[in-house]
Amino acid sequence: MEAPLVLLVMGVSGSGKSTVGALLASKLGWKFYDADDYHSEENRMKMGKGVPLSDQDRIPWLCSLHDILVRDVASGQHVVLACSALKKMYRDILIHGRNDVPLKSNESAKGKLAGEQLLVVYLCGSFEIISRRLFQRKGHFMPPELLQSQFSILEPPSAPENFIQVSVDQSVSEIADAIMEELK
Ligand SMILES: Nc1ncnc2c1ncn2[C@@H]1O[C@H](COP(=O)(O)OP(=O)(O)O)[C@@H](O)[C@H]1O
Ligand SMILES: O=C(O)[C@H](O)[C@@H](O)[C@H](O)[C@H](O)COP(=O)(O)O
């Protein structure tokens, strides 16, 4: 596997993206971003009221995360991004931006991410395990009741996406070690 510049740690709410992503970033000495920190106030309020986000709600959020990835990679910064990225289209936006948005006059196609520069790390697990963890998690805006809607739209990564899959049914350090092993 070509050494990636970006690890995208993805999965449904409660799958451990933030916990595993932060640990991985500290092990690797890479910069860590939690996509939760980049939601608009409207998106947070919507989720807080128990209403799932729509594509229209997510697309500007994903575009701004894409811009961050491109900027960091261009400056040689390696990145771990924890982001739900539930649909293939969302992962495509993180990697390529939005193809239907014309480039501004001062932008060029260079500075885009190549697919192989980003490795998708899919944290997979059953509804039962993840739901239990979400109900135990305190002080987060995301209500556990939205988990079913996340599973309903989840499109697990598949070939030709550049991805690995790790079961969440093990400890956080075991998950991080398994991912580190794949990176060797
Ligand atoms: N492998 C694991 N084993 C046990 N608890 C975990 C594991 N991964 C995450 N957790 C716990 O589950 C909850 C959800 O994890 P979190 O990292 O917030 O998930 P996400 O960022 O995907 O929503 C947190 O309370 C976290 O401490
Ligand atoms: O696309 C979405 O619907 C949201 O991004 C959602 O997937 C995400 O999970 C929330 O931000 C909650 O945050 P946690 O994933 O940390 O629970």
Image (spheres, rainbow, N blue to C red):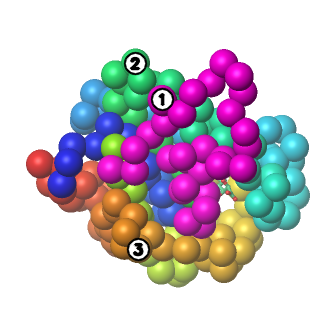
Residue denoted by label 2: 75
Q: Nearer the viewer, mark 3 or mark 1?
A: 1
Residue occupying image coordinates x 37% and y 69%:
160
Q: Mark 2 belongs to which amino acid? A: Ser
Residue denoted by label 1: 111
How far apart marks 1 and 2 lie (CA) works out to 10 Å
Q: Nearer the viewer, mark 1 or mark 2?
A: 1
Does 170 sit left or right of 138 as displayed?
Answer: left
Q: Are marks 1 and 2 in contact (CB under 8 Å)?
A: no
Residue denoted by label 3: 158
Residue occupying image coordinates x 57% and y 39%:
66
Residue 94 visible in the picture: yes
Above/below status of 70 relative to 119: above
Does 97 lie within the magenta span? yes
Sequence order check, earlier mark of 3 and 1: 1
Which quadrant is the N terminus positioned in?
A: bottom left
> Of helix, strand and loop, which mostly describes the magenta segment?
loop
- Residue in front for this viewpoint, 139 or 6: 6
Q: Quadrant of residue 61?
A: top right
Q: Are marks 3 and 1 in contact (CB under 8 Å)?
A: no
Tell me if mark 1 has few (under 14), some (14-19) or many (20+) residues whose alpha carbon lies within 10 angstroms of its own: some
Instruction: Find the magenta span and give its range.
Output: 87-116
- Callout 1 secondary element: loop
Q: Mark 3 belongs to which amino acid? A: Ser
Q: Mark 1 belongs to which amino acid? A: Gly
Tell me if mark 3 has few (under 14), some (14-19) or many (20+) residues whose alpha carbon lies within 10 angstroms of its own: few
Q: Where does the image place residue 78, in percent across and percent down from the top left?
A: 34, 30
Q: Where does the image place residue 71, in percent across and percent down from the top left?
A: 50, 24
Residue 139 visible in the picture: no
Sequence order check, earlier mark of 2 and 3: 2
Does 147 sit left or right of 169 as displayed?
Answer: right
